[in-house]
Structure formats: C-alpha cells, structure tokens
Amino acid sequence: MILSRLKITLLSMAALLLCVATADAQKKNNVSLKKATAWTEAGEWRNGFDAMPDKTINLQEFYSQYHKNKAQWDAAFKWLAETDLLNIPKGKLMIPGTNIRASVEDSNNEPLEKRRSESHRKKIDFMYVVKGTEGFYLLDHKSSKPNCEYSDEKDVIRYDYDKWQSHFFMSMPKRFIICFPSDWHIAKVQTPLADQSLRVIVLKIDYVE
C-alpha cells in the first residue's frame, strides 16, 4: 500500500514537473502568437513542401524550434517535398545528411482502447498523412497523469487519461501534425469514416531546449 502510494506520488510529481517545464519552454519561445502566425503563413520554412500545419499545432513552439534547429527542419521539409511519398517503400530510413529517422507506415486506425498514449522529451513527432484520414487525441494535462516512469532509452512516457476531456481531431493530406514534448497524444485512432486505412510519414526531429 505504501509503495503504491509512493508510486502515485512520484508519477504526480513527474506530471507537475513536465507542466512546469512546458510553461518554461513557452516563455523561452519569446515570440508572440501574432508573429508566429504571420511567419507560418508566409511559408519561408516550406523549402518546397506544399502542406500547411494543422490548426492544433503550437505555432509559437514551431517558430522557436525551427529557428533553433533550422538546418534539420530545412532538410526535413526538402525531403518531404522531393520524395514520392505515395510510392516510396514502407519502412524506416534516415534522411540523408541528418539524424532524422523517417518511418513510412501503411497502417489502419484502431479503436481507442487498442491505442497507446505517449509523449517524448528528446524528439518531436512530425506526422504527415499521405493517403487516408488519421484520427488523433490530444490529452488534457489536468485530467491526465503518467502511468509509468519515463524511458530514456525509448524516449517515451504513457498516460492515464479522460477520453471526454481530450480533444479528438482528424488529419488528412495537405495538413501536417507536430507533437512537441507538451503534446500528450494518441495517434491512429478510429474515425467515423468507412475507410480506416492510411499511409502516414512520421519524422523524429530533435527537440532543442
């Protein structure tokens, strides 16, 4: 009983520390939402890529991370623009000249209870649906809490969450998703549509403090 309470306390503290770190990171962005939005819409980051950020994306964080790690983001967008994403073989690969791992996934959305929640500290999840529609949940921080210790090796932590306090949305071609460390999320969740099959590109981009 004591050990169980201790575990719950430690996990609650971990959640609190992550929220504090998220708030600190947002302060360090030092850019207004108006400026970040204007920069995003101007598209100087595109490097030939013709998709736009989904409305769920934290544009201030996007602006900040792009400018802290411009070479890596430029390489990512260039690769996305110049690669035949519909016909490239599925599997994992490294984008040439970078340490960005790309996963080309032909998969299916599944019922929520079969999907796992996650967030990361070292890497940013960049997700782009090439074909089909992907269902997502973004977890509410107040009603969610870690249910395991952070794995440094796998760079992941899982959560218990309240479905009804979480935000469900769908991602389609021409819109990309970016999940920063503060974006606790669940991907490939079943949608109301008849077809649950999809092809999605997932890039792991370094998160810079």
Image: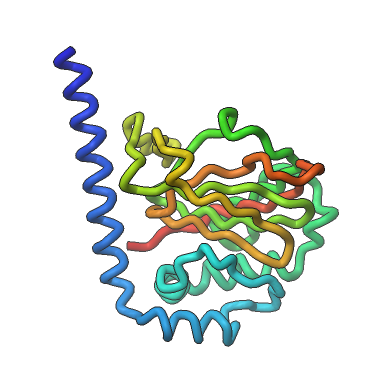
Q: Is residue 43 above or below residue 198?
A: below
**Position of residue 97 measured from the top left corner of the image (x, y, whole percent):** 60, 63
Q: Quadrant of residue 173?
A: bottom right
Q: Nearer the viewer, residue 148 or 34?
A: 34
To which quarter of the image does residue 160 belong?
Answer: top left
**Which residue is farthest right?**
87
Instruction: Please state, as top left, top right, bottom left or bottom right, where the C terminus lies in the image.
Output: bottom left
140 or 181: which is nearer to us? 140
Q: Is residue 149 visible?
A: yes
Residue at image position (41%, 68%) is 61
Is residue 94 in view?
Answer: no
Q: Position of residue 208 (x, y in %)?
A: 38, 62
Name the side, left or right, on which 74 lies relative to 139. Answer: right
Residue 54, position in %: x, y? 59, 65
Side of 51 relative to 54 (left or right): right
Quarter holding the N terminus? top left
The single residue placed furthest to the front in the displayed view is 164
Position in image of residue 82 (x %, y %): 75, 69
- Visual colour scheme: rainbow
Instruction: Return the residue found at the far top.
Output: 1
Q: Closest to the observer: 113 or 11?
A: 113
Q: Residue drawn 71% across and 48% down?
A: 104
Query: Going 52% across and 53% down the picture, which residue do you hit?
Result: 125
Query: At 52% from the left edge and 72% from the top edge, which residue is drawn?
Result: 71
Q: How many marks?
A: 0
**Is 146 situated left or right of 36 in this image?**
left
